[in-house]
Image (cartoon, rainbow, N blue to C red):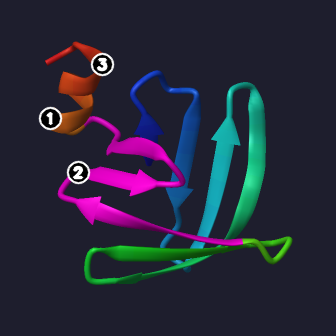
Amino acid sequence: MWVTADGHIRQELLADGRYDEARGERESAYTGSYQVDGTRIEYVDDTGFSADGTFDGDVLHHGGYVFYREGSEAHRQATGAG
């Protein structure tokens, strides 16, 4: 699970190449497929919109947001819990 520091956006990258993104109280706000190539991730949502992102260890930069691997040291530091 990848989350923003405030927890508002939560993105689950599933093992079958699908993702499910929740925003606030809205579960499954965006769903689609993804592919990872090295440190890059390419998304295509179920409406056909595409986007990409870049991994830097336990940090994911995507769509102008910074996501953290939930429970990682980077996540703890971003939330002030570490």
Q: How many marks?
A: 3
- At which x and y percent is residue 44? 67, 76
- Asked if disc 3 and disc 1 are in contact, CB closer than 8 Å, the reply is no
- At which x and y percent is residue 35? 49, 82
The magenta segment: 50-71
Which residue is at 77% across, 46% downward? Answer: 29
Checking the image for residue 58, the label placed there is: 2
Q: In this image, 56 relative to 48: left or right?
A: left
Between 65 and 20, which is closer to the camera in this rendering? Answer: 65
- Which residue matches tag 1? 73
Q: In this image, 75 relative to 8: left or right?
A: left
- At which x and y percent is residue 41? 43, 74
- Asked if disc 2 and disc 3 are in contact, CB closer than 8 Å, the reply is no
The answer to which of marks 1 and 2 sits earlier in the sequence is 2
Q: In this image, 9 relative to 39: left or right?
A: right
Label 3 sits on what residue type? Thr
Label 1 sits on what residue type? Glu
Which residue is at 40% across, 44% downward? Answer: 67
Circle 3 — which element?
helix
- Which residue matches tag 3? 79
Between 60 and 20, which is closer to the camera in this rendering? Answer: 60
Q: Any magenta on residue 68?
A: yes
- Distance from the alpha carbon under mark 3 to that under mark 1: 10 Å
The answer to which of marks 2 and 3 sits earlier in the sequence is 2
Q: Any magenta on residue 2?
A: no
Farthest residue, direction top? 80
- Graded by Cα atoms within 10 Å as few (under 14), some (14 to 19) or many (20 or more), the crowding at tag 3 reads some
Circle 1 — which element?
helix
Q: Is residue 27 above or below residue 47?
A: above
